[in-house]
Every structure is written in C-alpha cells, then in structure tokens.
Image (cartoon, rainbow, N blue to C red):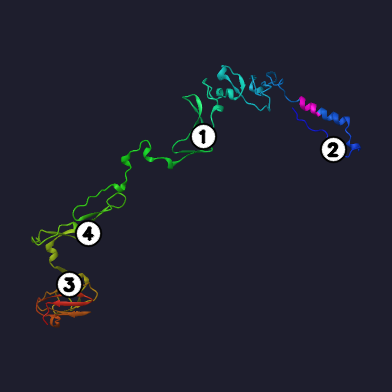
Amino acid sequence: MSDYTLQVTWSTKDAISTGEQLKAISATELGNEFSAILTAVNSKYDSTDRDVANGLCPIDANSLVPVGNLPAATDIAVGVLEIATDDEATTGAAVDKWLTPANLQAVLDQNGAYAEDITTLSAPGADRILFQDGAATNLNWLAVSTGLTLTGTNLTSDDSAIVHDNLSGFVANEHIDHSGVSVITASAGLAAVNDDLTSNIGLSIDVSTLAEFTATGAVDLDADYVILDDDGTEKKALVAPLLTPEVDTADFTTATEAITAANFGKLVSSSHGGAVTVTLPNSLKAGFWATIYANHASGSIVLTAAGTLNTANSFTTASAAYSSVTVFHLGSNVWTAWGLDS
C-alpha cells in the first residue's frame, strides 16, 4: 500500500507568467500525475478486500467496525491497527475475534462467567484502582480506605490517619498514661518525689508530718534513737553516745600543739609531762568547741589565739594537775575558754 505523492510541482508553474513556454502542462506530466494517483488508490484496502480470504476481518461499510471472525492470529497482516483475541470462553472453540467493547468481558473472565463491560463503568472522579469483584463476577473501582492514599499510580500508607486504639489486637491495659499512675504512698515523715512513671521516682524527708516530741516524757538515753547521716550513709544512733564527748585519738605529746577542725566536740588528752602551749587557730567554724585534758600530774595547759581570746580575768592557763579547759569559737576568729585559773 503506497501513499499518493505529487509528481509535478504545480506551485512553480503557477508562478510563471502567462504565455511563457514553461507554464504549459505537457501530456507526459499529466500522465505521470494520474499514474501516481491510480497506484496509490488501487493499493489501498477497501471493504471488499477486508475478508478472511485476505487475512483480515471484514469491516462494516457504514460503522467501520470490524465484524465476523478472523483467521489464525499469525495470518493477520502487518500494520493493521486492530487487536485480536481468543473467543474460546464464549464458543468453546479457539476462534479469533476482534477485541471490541461488546466482547471485552470474555477477555477479562476466561472461566465462562462474563465480567462487566469496562465501558459501562462510570468515571470515579478521583484516583481509583480497577479490580475484579470475584463474588459479584463484575468489575468495579476499588476505593482506598483509612490509612491508605492513592495519588496517580502511587499507593502509599497514611500513618497519620490510623487510630492506634482501633487496630486489631490492641490491648488497652498495655497502653497506659504513665502520668496518671502513682506508685508511692508516702507515710509519716516522708514525701513522694515525682511519684508517677514519667520521671525519676523518690522520697524526701518531710519533718512537718512527724509528731512533735514534748516534755511529757523523758528521753531514755539508752533506748531512744535518732536518725543521722554518717558521712553520706543514713544510720540510727542511740541518744546517749551523742551526748557524751568523744575521746580524740590524737594525743598532745609536745610542748607546742594546735587545735584543728578534727578536734571538734572531742576530749583531747595531753600526755606531755610539762606545760603545753595550745594555739587556737583562725577560720574554724562558729560554734566549734573542744576540751583539752592534762593527763599528767605535772602537766599544765597554756592557751594562745591567732585571733582574739576573751576569758574571765584574762586567764590563759590551767595549772592544776589533771586540770582541763574547754575552748569555744564565737565566730570571726574570737575565742573564749573556761577552766583557767591563772
């Protein structure tokens, strides 16, 4: 099949002035032109050529729709813009027919149950998926539901649309608001600190909730306890030892000694045989006190202060055998003492 192509460039002749020789049309030129037209027309298919004998399906002359059966698919002429399919589903035999809206259902369902004609479906007006509804044996548009989004050719999950509590297998008791769960009930003397599960949990001491001790009953020093912090460790302690001065393990053995922070609240023994001069330093905390004991028949204690020492009668010495003197820091490097006799 060939297409018609002009043999003579007629527009060129139109441009030539009347009367000139080249403007004339020769019989040869007309013969070539009509021969090209004849060849093109005769090489095209017409309705009488479209039949099984020529390897083509007959076509209706009015509607131009293919009708009738086809020969074997391998016999279809190359270049024919039509599609053939096996119509075995409707006839029980392998018969090739043109694919048209009227017989499309036989293509979509090869089990003998006719599917719905796709051309009868209404346009969904949105992105949809075409699917075969097996139970109803027809075609329909599949609309996505909660948690899915269909945009063009992309089907994606939409997590923001999913309600966690509505999922199958959800157990409410496993998903609890921790801020509403209290795990500590504080008793007397204690207060809960962050008692829900959203942060660190703990207890603090709340003295305001304790019963106040009154003078209606005496404290049993050998039976009653107090709670204290022993260098970072909480312990209970009998009252009696707390009210009894502790003997210092450090012993003044030379003629010149000095009170230190380690002597606070203790009885410091001096075993030096003669007079011991004890210096009271600066910078110890206000309220510091200690007792110095001359543990020798010929010993004596002489006080001197780096700051100020105020005593009765300005005495600075405890001269009697086995005497003792107590020193007390008033603050701001000002000391006082008692037990002095000269």
The amino acid pointed to by label 3 is: Trp
Q: Which residue is mark 4?
A: 233
Q: Position of residue 267 (x, y in %)?
A: 14, 71
Quadrant of the frame with the N terminus: top right
Residue at 21%, 70% (x, y): give it.
262
The amino acid pointed to by label 4 is: Thr
Region in magenta: 36-42
Compare residues 22 and 169 and report the one nearer the observer: 22
Q: Is residue 110 above or below residue 222?
A: above
Could you give the CA–CA distance between mark 4 and mark 2, rounded to whole angstroms?
120 Å
Q: Are marks 4 and 3 in contact (CB under 8 Å)?
A: no
- Say left or right for 19 vs 159: right
Q: Are marks 4 and 2 in contact (CB under 8 Å)?
A: no
Q: Position of residue 212 (x, y in %)?
A: 14, 59
- Mark 4: give few (<14), some (14-19) or many (20+) Cα within 10 Å: few
Q: Position of residue 328 (x, y in %)?
A: 17, 74
Compare residues 169 and 290 and report the one nearer the observer: 169
Q: Are marks 2 and 1 in contact (CB under 8 Å)?
A: no
Which mark identifies residue 128? 1
The amino acid pointed to by label 2 is: Asp
Name the residue at the front extreme.
18
* Sequence-first disc among 4 and 3: 4
Could you give the CA–CA distance between mark 2 and mark 1, rounded to whole angstroms?
59 Å
* Sequence-first disc among 3 and 2: 2
Q: Which residue is mark 3?
A: 289
Could you give the CA–CA distance between mark 4 and mark 3, rounded to whole angstroms?
25 Å
Q: Are marks 3 and 2 in contact (CB under 8 Å)?
A: no
Q: Secondary structure at mark 1?
A: loop
Residue at 32%, 46% (x, y): give it.
177
Residue at 36%, 39% (x, y): give it.
165
Could you give the CA–CA distance between mark 3 and mark 2, rounded to whole angstroms?
136 Å
